[in-house]
Image: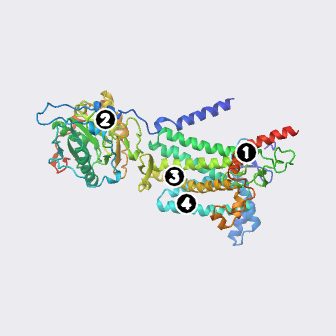
Amino acid sequence: MLKNIVIISTLIIIVIAVYFPSRHARHYNYISVKDMLNELDLKWPQNNRVLKNCSYNEIVTNDEDIEISSIKDKREFKKPLLGGEFIPDDCIALEKTAIIVPYRNRSYHLNIFVKYMHWFLQKQKLHYRIFVVNQNDSLPFNRAKMINYGAKMSIRLQYHCLILHDVDLIPINTRNIYACSKLPRHMSSSLDTFRYNLPYLTLFGGAVSITSEQFLKVNGMSNEFFGWGGEDDDFYRRLIYNNLEPCRFSPEVSKYTMLPHRKEDASENRFRTLEKTKEMEKIDGLNSISSSYIIKLEELYTLLIVP
Amino acid sequence: MDENSALCCCEYYDNNYERNHILACCCNCEDLDEAFESLITRHAVSQRNKQGLIMTLQDRLRVPWKGGAKQIAFDAILPVFILPVMLLIASISLWWTIFSFTTVVFFLILISNFLIKTIPYTKFFFMWTLTSLIILYIIFEFIVIPFLEILLWENIALSVLIFGFIMCIYVMKKRTNKLPRLGDCDAESGYVGKVCCKWTNCSLCLVRVPDKDHHCVWYDCCVGKHNQCVFILSLFFAIGALVYSSNLTLTSVCHPFNLYKSILLPDDCSEVYKLFELSFSFVSAIYSIIIALLLLILFGQQLLLVSLGLTLKEWARLPLRTRLCFGLTAHRPNSKGFFKNWKAVICWNKLLLKSNVLEVDSM
């Protein structure tokens, strides 16, 4: 009798351990395609007598997947203004988006990314500009700090929507609109290297959108995360503490592909830094970075060099 | 020490019916002494000496067990070491993978000839199946799942396939154990007298098998009319589980792509050897695919043979030309036509039931 109970309880423990949900990739709540447009935080400027406001219905209904093999192909797009800024000339854009790309030593990826993104974004009738923030020192890569620099400049230039974007991520679905939603949005929830699944529910890295007000409210990201990993989880916590729970669009819309490269080693002290999120939020972030950086206007993007 | 007291978990009775302890495994071996002496004095080791060595080795290779240390068969324990070592070596680089897999194939060919001749009742092959199953499942659950790229329902689906496979083997063995034993006389056993099929003796299972197809060493079980449909089902489950798990693993460790927007397949595995976890799971997936391919051939062969009403032994005796025509031109005395052949295989239980009922009637 006792033996049976022991056997059955060990079996139950094994089954629970094997099928425990957090050991697996997760299904997640998302905003359905037909609600996408209502959830967007588009600001409506005053009516212009010459031009009408842009309509975004077409973008969220025109469903098309880009072939992954064709990403490196040469694509036709209108030449943007110096510094990679583009303003649609046939209507008034309702969103002013800054694409902020933290970057170091990935010129091959950057070249593919920038050309693809101009082609991809010009179809979306957005007023956008690509900021590439280059870390110019020999310390381990500090993704969050680079984003803070990019965000600081974008906010000064009155960009309403910030999209924090890794240089190796390429959006595949044409409905994936690069405008901000009312809540911060995790855009790359269906990444091909993760088998188009979401590894865990609190993931908030890769490509995310957040309005500049919200970014200011949480004091940006932490500057203390050197090396790979941790900074996105810290950012997620900051959002939760400020009642800004991120949302996601449906998996078909959020498809991304990752340009091939080696995975970087995870930084060893990322968990130690994570524990201090709450007390560090007010003093470590957007308000604690220096204001010395060099701005270079390239043909297709604005380059910020952070010493 | 009292000779009659119960054995402790590390004690056992050896070849000479004397109490022995497993820690004393290296003490007091005359054959080893002799062998070393002849090595040092450069004399050849005698045949009797060699046999004695192996006997002693087998006798002293034991694991502690309740009620006295249990003997473990030397050949049966081999796969437990070979398989992990093969996978570990294979995960170093691509060339090591090729080297390790080919070595194991050659080793298997050599040892299977040796084993079948010298120890026909060996559990080596069954242990190989069992160890493969356990190792592959452990790798999947504890290395591939923690990549956090596999959904819960995918894990459950794989478990269902594996469970189906294990149940099939269980049913096969159970049905074989129910067959009349070799020593029993015909009258005692229920359904031998029936004209349903040709009864063959199996010296390994010690039973009489109806329409014996072959003795499967990998399952350590006879395959005949009584369990052939379960055997085919088990092959189906095994192929399903192997292909599915390898696909899940490969799409996790490699770069995947969507075929026709529905099936996820791997397309670029060039980075797997850079990290041990990746390469180890990759190699296990390759091993699964190789087994699945071999099983697929067997599966197709079984389907064909059942349709034709042939057994594996009859098939092996056919000339190559007939085999190339899928055996259609062969002389098939036992075939009753496509549908009846399949009915005979699938409805074995009904046949059994009917014969039992008849038995009761005649009493």
Q: Quadrant of residue B200?
A: bottom right
The residue type indicated by label 2 comes to Arg
Image mark for residue A185:
2
Kindly report the distance in space between the C-alpha atoms of the residues bearing marks 1 and 4. 40 Å
- From the image, tell me which residue sits under label 1: B348
Q: Secondary structure at mark 4?
A: helix
- Are marks 1 and 3 in one subunit? yes
Q: Secondary structure at mark 1?
A: helix
Instruction: Determine whether B104 is above or below B11 in the image.
Output: below
Kindly report the distance in space between the C-alpha atoms of the residues bearing marks 1 and 3. 36 Å
Of the pair A112 and B313, the residue shown nearer to us: B313
Q: Is residue B279 left or right of residue B175?
A: left
Sequence-wise, which precedes: disc 3 or disc 4? 4
Residue B214 pos. (x, y %): 71, 55
Image mark for residue B101:
4
Chain letter, disc 1 residue = B
Q: Is residue B271 left or right of residue B110?
A: left
Residue A30 pos. (x, y %): 37, 33
Query: For the residues carrying marks 1 and 4, which lies nearer the camera in this image?
Result: 1
Chain letter, disc 2 residue = A
Kindly report the distance in space between the C-alpha atoms of the residues bearing marks 3 and 4. 13 Å
